[in-house]
Structure formats: structure tokens, C-alpha cells
Image (tube, rainbow, N blue to C red):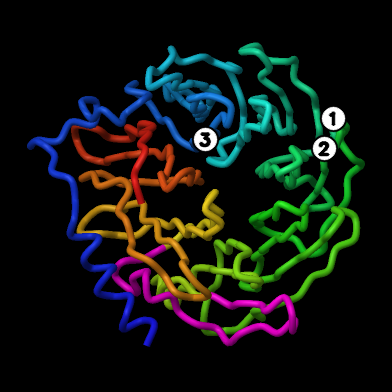
Amino acid sequence: MKIIFIIPLFLLSLSCTKVFPEPYDPFEDPRNISRNIGCSVGSGIALDPTRDLSYVIWLDMEERADWEFKLFYRERRNGIWSKIDTLFHKTDSVWYDASEIVCDSKGILHLVYTEEEKILYRMRINDEWTEPETLSNPNEIALIPQLCIDKNDNLYLIFEESPKGATFRKREGGVWSEKSYPPQRGDFDMFVEDNGNIHLAMDTDDQITYVFSRDGVNWKDEIILLNDTIYYNLCSTVGVCFGKVYVVWVRSYGGFIRGLYMRVKDTLTGKWSDIERLGIAGGTGRAPYLPKFVKGDDGYLYLGWIERVGANDEVLISRMVNDRVWDKVVNISNTPMHSKFYSFIVKDGIIHIAWWEGIDDSRWKDEWDIFYDEIQY
């Protein structure tokens, strides 16, 4: 019944697309905030709760030379964009998710990023950046930081560090904790509740694992999808709402993406639901991938993902209005190009998102730009 109910909303929402002049020129799109010749990817976004101020960061290979990226920063104050600021000039990291930002209740911006295979941390206070602080072992390789914040302005950081794998640190009262090591290895996604409960979804070797901690020291893991010889499962994300834990992942078979799949844990009984396919996302042919849960300030979970619409990859977002009941699907990007994203923020019913757009033809080969928009859900 859920799938039958949802599909008409899905088709209706995708039909309401913006109209762009022909031929489409990405440099003329008012949402394009990078507008340079090069590879701009891996955008992160934060909002200042104390004033009308948005922050966007991204990696930029402006000169396309030896995969050496710069970390660019730009802010939108009272609707006006600042000039682009370069936070550092060189990094050997080519990970799209090599940097993350959050803003606390006092308007202080917190940044983590990868440089020379180390995890660095900086704050922006009164419009000035602090000096970088190294949070990983300088003698080991560290990559892929993820940063979350709770209602008390505590920071939660997880990253990949050799040889341990997933490595966690918490910043409370201005002090970073010692490292702890969640069980399991592989790609991960982190979700932190307002009360500080930490939830991780991990996927490695075709296995999906859910990991939980109340304090960032003691961890409990549950394998919710075992390896098999039929499907390949990857790109998991986790979210919490309605007293339940939701884990969504991508499933492929025979080299083709079959769709987005989900299991749900009831936090009262501790039981997991059966595996179900999400009807809001397409199946084979539409190739949905890279799902990401975000909790809005309205208390609802929003799920974003990338999906083939027509000939292009688009960024789509839907809201869960009740347990496993989904609202309309909104096409965020709506361009004749290929769209990628990492995360977004929902505040006062408005989706704030920065993503990157690329097209591979004779005019715009290897050209990727950062786009920003605010969309009423």
C-alpha cells in the first residue's frame, strides 16, 4: 500500500521542473556560485542561527593540475555573496567528502578537513579563522572526516585512520576527547541525536552494520544485512525519528542498481523490520544512489539521494512525515547536467543545499561548478 500511495506523488513532483533557456549555459545560472574553469566538488554547508548567514566550502582543482585541490570558502550574508576565500592551496586528498562544517548556537563556525592525509580543525570566530589543530595521528593516514553537532554545541567527529579504521573523537567544553574505535571497518555515515546518542551505519564487503553509542566510548554493533552472493549493498545512511532507527542503503545486482532499501529498528523492542524497497526512489534504469538522512528543525527526517531523471543525474529529497510514510519528492537540481551532493540543511521549511554540477561534452568537458539554492519544501 505504501508504494502504491507514494508513486503518484513521486511522478507529480518530478514533472514540476524549472525551464531553462536553450542552449543552457551553467555559467549564467544564478545558482552557480563558483563559476570557474575547473573541477569544483565536495561542497559542505552551514547556517548561522544568530544572523542571516550561510557558509559554503568546497574542494577546487582550478587549474586541473596533478589533482591538487584548494579548499574554497564563501559566505552569503543578508542575501549577498562574499568573495571566494582560499583556506589552503594544496592537498593530496581527492575525496569529495574531505571537509565538513557546522555552526553552533553562538554563531561560531567549526571546520574539519583533510590536508596531506591528516585531519585538521579550525574555528571561525568574529569573522576570523583560528590556526589549524591536528586531530589525527600525524604519522598515520587519515581521511574522510564527518562532523556532527548536538543541541549543547558538542562536536562529534569520525574519520578513517590507518591502521585502526573508523576513529571517533568528541569535543565537549572546548576539549577534544581521546580517540575511540567503533567496531567494524568500511565506509560510514554518522547521525547524532540532540541528547548525544551516536548512530553509525557502516558498509564493507557487501555487509551493512549498525553501530550505537551513548558516550562515544562504549560501542555496540549489529549486523543487519549479511554478505550474500546475489546482491551488492553499499552507501548506507542512518537517521532517527518517531522512536525508530532507519538505515537506508543502495542495492545492486549484475552491475545495475536495483534501488534504495531500508530496515527499521524499534528502539522500544529492539527488533528490526524486514528489508523493504523504498517506493519513493526509482529502480533499475533510474539508478538511485548516495542516500543521506538529515533531520530538519521541524523534527522530521529528510532523505536526499541522486537519481537518473531522463538523461541526467538529479538531486532528489523527500520528507518522512510518519513512520515509513513519505511526502512528495522534490527535484532540487533540475538542470540538463549531472548533479552530485553531500548534504543539506532544513530550516523553517526551507531546504538549504550546496551541490556540484558537471557535464561531459565538447563544451564543458570535466567542468564542475558549485550551485547553491534555498527551496521551500
Callout 1 secondary element? loop
Which mark, by number, is residue 45? 3
Taking the view exactly as shown, the residue that stands out farthest to the left is: 22
Look at the image and tell me whether residue 114 can be seen: no
Q: Amino acid at mark 1?
A: Gly
Query: Is 279 part of what is drawn in magenta?
Result: yes
Residue 206: horizontal and vertical position, in percent? 61, 72
Precedes in sequence: disc 2 or disc 3: 3
Relative image position of residue 145 (x, y in whole percent):
68, 42
Q: Which of the two discs, 1 and 3, labels the residue nearer the N terminus?
A: 3
Is 321 situated left or right of 212 in this image? left
Residue stretch rendered in magenta on the structure: 262-288
- Number of residues whose C-alpha sits closer than 10 Å to that of mark 3, classed few (under 14), some (14–19) or many (20 or more): many
Check disc 2 and give the amino acid type.
Answer: Arg
What predominant SS class does the magenta segment belong to? loop
Q: Residue at x 43, y 40 (%)?
A: 352
Which quadrant holds the N terminus?
bottom left
Asked if the stretch drawn in magenta spans residue 38, the answer is: no
Query: Marks 1 and 3, Cα distance to the nearest angstrom?
Result: 22 Å
Q: Is residue 295 above or below residue 345?
A: below
The answer to the question of whether label 2 and label 3 lie on touching residues, with beta carbons closer than 8 A, is: no
Left or right side of 373 for 248: right
> Regarding mark 3 in the picture, which secondary structure is present there?
strand
Residue holding disc 1: 174
Residue 157, relative to residue 279: is it above or below? above
The residue that mark 2 highlights is: 171
Residue 153 rendering spot, x and y as whole percentages:
74, 37
Q: Are the residues tagged 2 and 1 within 8 Å (C-beta)?
A: yes
